[in-house]
Image (cartoon, grey):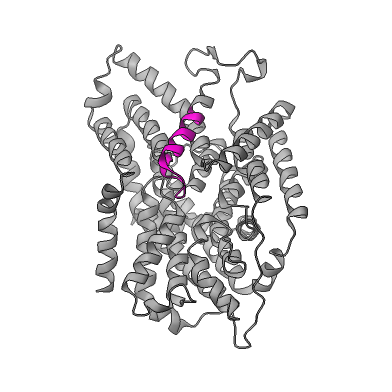
Amino acid sequence: MSGLGDLITGLGTLATPEMLFHAAWATLLGIVVGSLPGLTATMGVALMTTLTYSLESTTAILVLVCMYVGAIYGGSRSAILLNIPGTPASAATSLDGYPLAKAGRAGYAMGLATAGSALGTLAGVVMLVLVAPPLAEAALNFGSFEFFWLAVFGILISGQLTADTSPLKGYIAGLLGLAVAMIGSEGIHAHVRFNMGLQDLNAGIALIPAMVGAFGFAEVLTAMWNRAGELAVKKDKSDRTIPDLVDLWRYKLTIARSGLIGTLVGIIPGVGEDIGAWASYAAARKTSKEKEKFGHGSHEGLIAAETGNSAVVPGSLIPAITLAVPGSASSAVLIAALFIHGIRPGPLIMIEQPDFIGLISAMVVIATLFMAFYGLTLTKAFVQVLKVPYAYLMPVVFVLCVIGTFALSQRIFDIWIMVFFGLVGFVLRQMKYPMAPLVLGIILGDLLDKSLRRGLTLSDGELAPFFTRPVSAGFVALILLSIAMNVPVVRRLALAPVRWIGARLDA
C-alpha cells in the first residue's frame, strides 16, 4: 500500500496549475519530436535536459518524463502516415498502421494506437509502483565493491541497447565512453589525466555537451541522410479517431499480454522499447485467430505493438531509478538528466528521496493522460507537422543544440565539444554503432573509477572481496549471463518464460 500511497501523494504534488502547464506543453512537444523521422525520444530527452537546467528539479524531471512518454508514442504518427517510424520503438506499428492509412482509415489507426499506448503505459506504472520500492530497499546493502560491479554491468549491457547492431559494437561504444570519462582530474586525489595538454580538459569532458552532440547534432546530420516518406492522404468517409470500445474489449487479452510483456522487457536492462513492441507483436500474431490480417491492416497487431512499446517506458524506469542501470537508450539519457538535476538514481534513492518512486510514477500517469488527450483530438495537426521540410526543421534543432550547450557554462569550448561528439556520433552511426552506450560509459565511468579505487583501499589491495561478497558475486553472475544472452540459443531459452506467461493469458 505504501507504493500506492506514494503514487497518490505524487499526483497531489503535481496537481497544480504550474505543473500541469509544464506537463501539457512537454508532452505535446514530445509527441511532435517523436512524430518527426530522425528526431528520436532519446534525442528529445537529451536536448530538453539542456533547456530545463534552470528549472526547479521536480519541474525539470516532470518535463523530461513527459517528453519521454510523448516521444515514444509520437513515433506512431509517422509510422502510420508515412511508413517511416518516428522512433525505433514504432517500427512494428508501421506493419499494420500504414496499410490502414492507405485504405483511408488513418484516423482510426491513430486512435487505436493512442488507446494501446495509454493502456500499456498505465500497466507499466502498476509494475513500477509495486516492484521498484522493494528492489531499491534490497539494493541498500551496496558498498564500493558492489557499486564497481554495478557500473561494469551497466556498461556491459550497453551492447544490447540497440537491437539492430551487433553486441560487440555496443561494447566498443560503451568502452569509448568509459575512456572519455577518464579524461581530466580523477575523483579521489584530483590528479589530471589524459588532458592532451589542453587546460580546458582539466575538468574532464562535460556530460551535457557530449550528450547533446551525440544525440542532438548527430541526429541532425543523420536525419538529412534519411529517405522521405510518402504521406498517406486517402480518406474513408467513415474514418474517425475515437476507437470503438467493442474493438478494445475484443482484444483485451492482447492488451493485457502486451502490457505485461512490454513491462518485463523494460525491466531487463538494455533491451528497449523496440524489442517490447516486436515481442508483443510476435506473441499477438502467434495466438491470434486472425493471423492472415497481420501485416495488412490488423487492428490487433497495431494495438499489440503500441501497447508493448509504451509499457516498456515505466518498466525501464524500474532498473534506472533503483540501480542506475538503464532499461532502454532513452532511460540512459534520463539517468544522466536526473544526476544533473540533483537526483541520484541507484540503491540510495530510498534513503535520499524515499518518495521519488511514487512521484515519478505520478509523472508518467499525468503524461499518459495528456498523451491520450492530444492523440485523440489533434490528429489533423500532427499530419501538418509531418509536412515540415527538413530544410527548415534541422537548422532549428542545430541552433537549440548550440544554445543549450553554451547556456550551461558560457564556454565556447563546450560548443566545440558538442560539435566534435556530433561528428564522431554521425560517423559511428553510419558504421552502425549505437550512441546510448557511449553516453552511458561517460555517466558510469566516474562511479566505476572511484568504486574500484575505494574498494582496493578498503581491502588493502586484495581482489577477493570483489568476488566473494554475496551481492558482488550476484553481479558477476549477471554480467556473465548478459554476455551469454548474446548467444542466440541462450537468448531464446531466457525469453521462454515471457512467452509462456503470454500463452497462459490467452488460455
Q: Is residue 165 magenta?
A: yes
Instruction: Note whether 106 is above or below 441 in the view shown.
Output: below
Q: Position of residue 314 (x, y in %)?
A: 44, 55
Q: Quadrant of residue 350?
A: top left
Instruction: Note whether 191 is above or below 209 in the view shown.
Output: above
Q: Is residue 129 magenta?
A: no
The extreme bottom residue here reads 237
Which residue range is magenta in the image? Answer: 159-178
* Magenta highlight: main SS: helix
Q: Nearer the viewer, residue 284 or 507?
A: 284
Q: Nearer the viewer, residue 395 or 115?
A: 395
Instruction: Note whether 241 is above or below 332 in the view shown.
Output: below
Instruction: Note whether 449 is above or below 364 in the view shown.
Output: above
Residue sitting at x 56%, y 65%:
76
Q: Is residue 282 left or right of residue 90?
A: left
Q: Position of residue 495 (x, y in %)?
A: 29, 54
The extreme right residue here reads 392
Q: Can the viewer see residue 311 in this picture?
A: no
Q: Position of residue 437 (x, y in %)?
A: 48, 38
Q: Position of residue 412 (x, y in %)?
A: 74, 28
Residue sitting at x 32%, y 70%:
286
Residue sitting at x 61%, y 68%:
374
